[in-house]
Image: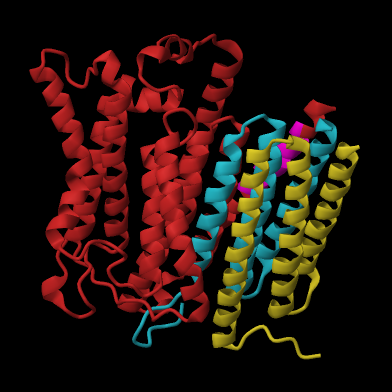
Amino acid sequence: MAEYIAMALITTGLIFFIAGSIGLLRLPDLYTRLHALTKADNVGLGMIVLGLAIISGDLITTFKLLLVWLFVLASSAASAHLIAQRARRRERGLWKP
Amino acid sequence: MSTFLGITLIVLALSLCIGLIRIFRGPTIEDRIMSVQLMGTTGVGILLVLGLLMDMPASIDIALVLAMLAAVSVVALTRREAEGTKSG
Amino acid sequence: MEALIWTVFDFLLITAMLALGWSALSTHSLRRGIALFIAFGLLLSLVWVRLRAPDIALAEAAIGTGLTGALLLAALRDEESAAGAASTEKPKNTIADYLLIAATVILALILGWALIDALMNRQYSGLANEVFTQLDRSGVTNPVTAVLLNFRAYDTFLELAVLLVAVLGIRSLNVSRRPYLKAGLVLSGLTVWLVPVLIVISAYLLWVGAHAPGGAFQSGAVLAAAGVLLRLSGYHGAGLPARIVIRRALMIVGVLVFAIIGLGLMVLGRGFLEYPLAWSGSLILGIETAATLSIAVTLIMAFLAGETGRAGNQEDSSC
């Protein structure tokens, strides 16, 4: 039973990951791509982490996995801001509708 | 279960390759920096799944270090110096 | 089915790495090449994990991704501010370039043939079995640390000396770098928690190196990344101690402790760096701690190009 929940979580995570990557590829503008990248990828990683934690069943491993996800979340939030600030400085990549 | 995780691995690797297209094509340097960020996050995902599949608990440590250092790389790529040099 | 999955995954990984490596070298803008190179380093640590070499993967993730990228970018800035942005665009290939390419391809083919021949036709056994049988006499349970700090400790001793010489060489170039802009809210917010976390991770890697992947090099590299981050956030001293004497002392402490322990053991009647069995673990930990500090400070000084004076103040800019 737990395995099925884990598999469902990981599959959802993968869907988010693919969505993020396709967004990076297909969206027209730098700033929109940034949205796709940080939001979708981090949620995808979180789902995968939850699924892996359930599979491993070990408390210490679960704690470590959640810690990794937390750090990825915080650091990619800051990285996204920094990238956007840099792009803004150059006023580039704006998509005119 | 290990087959399922194996397929997960391949999907993540495909996601990585899609990010690669952006790093080659992306018109601006910020697109490429974003791809570095993407590869960092996807790499963390791949490492966590690999750790479980290959029974290497150390890969969680590697994933942790990779996540932190990818952030430091993005900071290095986006900072600029003082006194009006060319930005970045 | 298992084998098929691994084959597909490895194929994707190898293709990605080859594509990245090729484009990193052949792109005409050096800044773009550096970004590609950082991505290449990220993928390389995945490859090391796939090859069951987690210690190297840790080192690659720390050094190849964060530190090398930052070093290359700093060098790029020096070049651009000295000679203008156009100087970092690659010129067109000449006849000499094509000759070199041909020679390199021939060399690569010879090496490839030699590798395939070695893998398919020759029997060889590495020293892995010997290492594992002697592992309980080494004082640690991680075979990589045992080899680095006990069986081949002399090599590690000399590697630390090589790092020191490298930094002296960098210092002798006498480049002075402008400081970075003061960090805004977002970057300060990141630095405030990331630097302590990196310090804790570095201590963890140092401690865990005795029985799991980790060790002095990885720990020192992560600590150096913390220093590089501080410098990038506008802290011109990169978190190093302010007094030059302490900085110098930290840079040499790794080689010094190694030499003292080695020679001290000789004085006690054993060979150079031949640890007594009961003390192996503690001696290794002591050497690793000193080595971590040394490696971290040396790498940070390399990033600083050997100077940490206040901007424009040449008297302070000694190493």
Q: Is residue C208 left or right of residue C154?
A: right
Q: Quadrant of residue A69?
A: bottom right
Residue sitting nearer the eye, C92 or A70: A70
When the figure is inspected, residue A15 is found, relative to residue C281, above or below; the finding is below
Q: Residue furthest front?
A: A59
Look at the picture and state if B62 lies above or below B25: above
Query: Please, is residue A23 above or below residue C56 in the view?
Result: below
Residue C316 in picture, x, y percent from top left? 14, 72
Q: Residue B61 in the image: x percent, y percent?
A: 55, 43
User: Residue A26, image x and y in percent?
Assistant: 80, 70
Colour assigned to chain B in the rendering is cyan
Q: Residue at x 26, y 41 (%)?
A: C290
- Viewport quadrant of the N terminus of chain C: top right
Q: Is residue C127 above or below residue B66?
A: above
Q: Position of residue C80 (x, y in %)?
A: 37, 75
Judging depth in this view, the residue of C137 and C144 nearest the camera is: C137
Tell me which chain appears yellow.
A
Q: In the image, what residue occupies the spot 17% across and 25% down?
A: C262
**Number of marks:** 0
* Main secondary structure type of the part rendered in magenta: helix
Residue found at the very far left of the displayed protein: C267
Q: Nearer the viewer, residue C121 or C64?
A: C64
- Image quarter hosting the C terminus of chain C: bottom left
Q: In this image, B29 relative to C270: left or right?
A: right
Q: Front-most of C68 and C255?
A: C255
Residue C306 on the magenta segment: no
Q: Report whether residue C95 is seen.
A: no
Segment colored magenta: C6-17
Identify the colour of chain C in the image: red
